[in-house]
Amino acid sequence: MPPKLLTGNAAAAWGARLAAVDYVPAFPITPQTEIIEILGAWLDSGEMPGRMVTLESEHSMITAAGAAAATGVRVFSATSSQGLLYAMEMLYTVAGWRAPFVLVNVSRGLSAPITLEADHNDVLAARDSGFLQLHCADCQEVLDSVLLAYRLAEDPLIRLPVLVNLDGFYLSFTREPVSLPEAEAVRGFLPPFDPRDIRFAANAPASQAVAVLGGGPYSYFRYEAHLAALNGVAVYERVAAEFNTLFGRQRDAVECYKTIDAEIVFYMIGSFSTKAREAVDRLRDAGQKVGLVRPRLLRPFPAGHVLTAVAGKQGIIVIDQNLSIGLGGILYTELLASLYDKPGAPPVVTSFIGGLGGRDISPQEFYHMLTITRQAIASGSVPPPRLLYTAGELREIRKLQAIAQVEREETAPGQGPIRDSNTAQETPRE
Amino acid sequence: MFRIRIHGRGGQGIKMASRVLGTALFQAGYTVQDAPKYGAERRGAPIFSSVRAARETINERGTIYRPDLVVVADDTLLAVPAAGTLLGIDGHTVVLVNSHEPADTWCHRLNITARLLILPACTEVEDRADLPHIGATCAGAAARLLGVIARAGLLEAIAGELADLGPDIVAENQASALAAFDAMADWQGAVTEGIAVAADNYVVPDWIELPFDDARMAAPDIRACANSVEVRTGLWRTMRPIIDYDLCKRCWWVCSTFCPDSAIAVAEDIPVIDYDHCKGCMVCVGVCPPHAIEGVPEYLAQQQDKLQPAPGDANATETADR
């Protein structure tokens, strides 16, 4: 079929439809709502078999998803941001049940202050839950990843739920050309779910929420889930190779864009990494040997693939669209941990926090991150992590704070300025 | 790559305009990316959409900072800083504005060097915001300016994007789009593809070290309505509620309580609407027990203001002039 223009949300819905899911527990949240609206319309018109139930919260939605998956049917659900966090207790629980299903998360910054735009602190908050994670860079990849995710979730070597992440606005509401595979071809890749021994019937009740006393049994169950997740790297590789053969699209666990002769590579996840691809092309026009390394698979963490991709490079530029408050970028700290003491690990790894709450990253900022990293390589002195934040952006905030000062005068007169002369002034660096 | 930004207000069909243009370009053989951008969705609030079209894979995404074409469906947005209509325009950019006023006037007012064109109105209306099918009209005019979309392609794109609304609405939108397409014949191909930001001799970003601020300032608190006071959300209004004090029962609380924007104050038992901040949601019109509040189209109310400025309404004249 020739490609058609689809939003990331529509691509996610098509993924669920082509996967022939049986059950969709749903709860709406911006910017995910379009996914369940599309699925609802298809289920309503009979274009798609299956059943949708709207729950009263994401907590119930994930409970329903896990419970349905535990009966041996194919389950799809989707959420975003606050919704994912509201379901957090059940994310750990259903992963502990070893219930295989696919959950799409449309990334959006977390409150407070509240926002609607993309940021990865929501999905990364679930990184330790037992869900595997696939991160998408464009709309085609959203569809492909949903199909890949079912193969991962249902593989007997894994049997864990899988999160597929796409960025709010930058993918969710953005239309791009997407090739829809024929349903027949998808059935060849993803046959109907064979639940094997996963089944539930009213006349044969079972319990999947067993209690254990003592750390020994608990350790056993948790670590078994960990071992299953670790199997995900090899299973992903096998499944992605099969996908490539059938559909002609290479979906490596770690995307390596122009890295072979690269001296320095950008390292990031999500839709902003296509901006990095663009920057790599422009920098190569200017004679700079740079590339991009992008994990699609983030859980399990494909440490070996990442090491192979970056080994022997002079430096890595890590861009985190998230912030572990009190520590820094999550990708940065995880990457450093995985590279420590490894032969060939690049000597310089610079850290940048950019894109929080959907804040854009300009081409010039990509170019300048490279300049700074080259300087660090030349001097042997690595600069501290930096927030991508301009004088103009601070000026805007200061304007709002000047208004807030008026407000303070109205509500608490005579308390003086909020911002006194001791407050640090913003100073340009370099 | 073509980079196009379309500005308008929620409800004008700005997302539809970008989809029509995107689909037409896609059918013409381009790789396309189109997207709307909005905040908390609301009719009348400023929104914009973007279309990128190229012969190769598009890796850029998000807001367009260096547009080849900017379409402004509603000229009142040019005075709203938050709408960002003029973001990144330069001598290469073509700006197409839906306005009663001539291009020279806007170039002078905005002090811009971009090529500014006025959207031709096929239907003469008193207020340009009332033009029917404004989204389709913008898409039709933009298609001609790009010079790479044929009439048939434009019509097909509208038929595809609006199919769910039925054949009559498709036909009406096609007629409006086609009229604008034909009216822009003299400027066919006026918009040309821009180039990417080069990586040599780039402008160094003016990054700063974010200073530590006391939590009294750095916590996102709102203690009073001062933020809201400074933002004249009354500019969003397309309908104006007007209280008929002869009918008002002086109940003092219904309209003021239900107003979601606290834009109705009661002084000495008389409700008074703050038109700087009333967004024209018409909730007060609906809840007033004696039906003493009437909804009047804003442009008619503004014409009335011009004739007889309300006493003490300092903004009446300024608003009417705009």
Image (cartoon, rainbow, N blue to C red):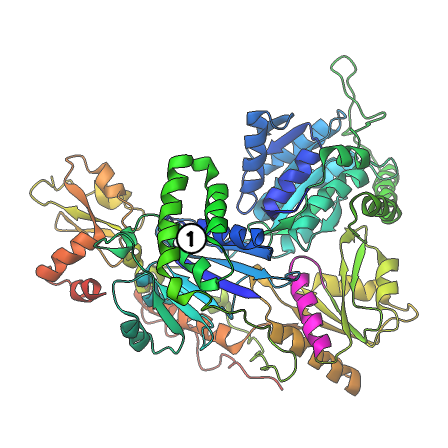
Q: Position of residue A151 (x, y in %)?
A: 80, 39
In the rendered structure, the answer to whether residue B180 lies left or right of residue A375 reads: left
In the rendered structure, the answer to whether residue B181 lies left or right of residue A153 reads: left
* Magenta-drawn stretch contains A277: yes
Q: Position of residue A364 (x, y in %)?
A: 61, 76
Measuring 27% from the left and 69% from the top, which residue is drawn there?
Answer: B102
Measuring 55% from the left and 26% from the top, which residue is drawn there?
Answer: A44
Q: Position of residue B115 (x, y in %)?
A: 39, 73
* Magenta-drawn stretch contains B158: no
Q: Position of residue B1 (x, y in %)?
A: 58, 66
Our reading of the magenta stretch's main secondary structure is helix
For disc 1, the neighbor class at 10 Å (few under 14, some 14 to 19, many from 20) is many
> The disc labelled 1 sits on which kind of residue?
Ile
User: To which chain does the residue with label 1 belong?
Assistant: B
Residue situated in front as seen by the camera: B296 or B260: B296
Residue situated furthest right in the rendering = A343
Above or below A206: residue A33: below
Pointer 1 residue: B14
Residue situated in front as seen by the camera: A409 or B42: B42
Q: Which residues are magenta?
A: A268-285
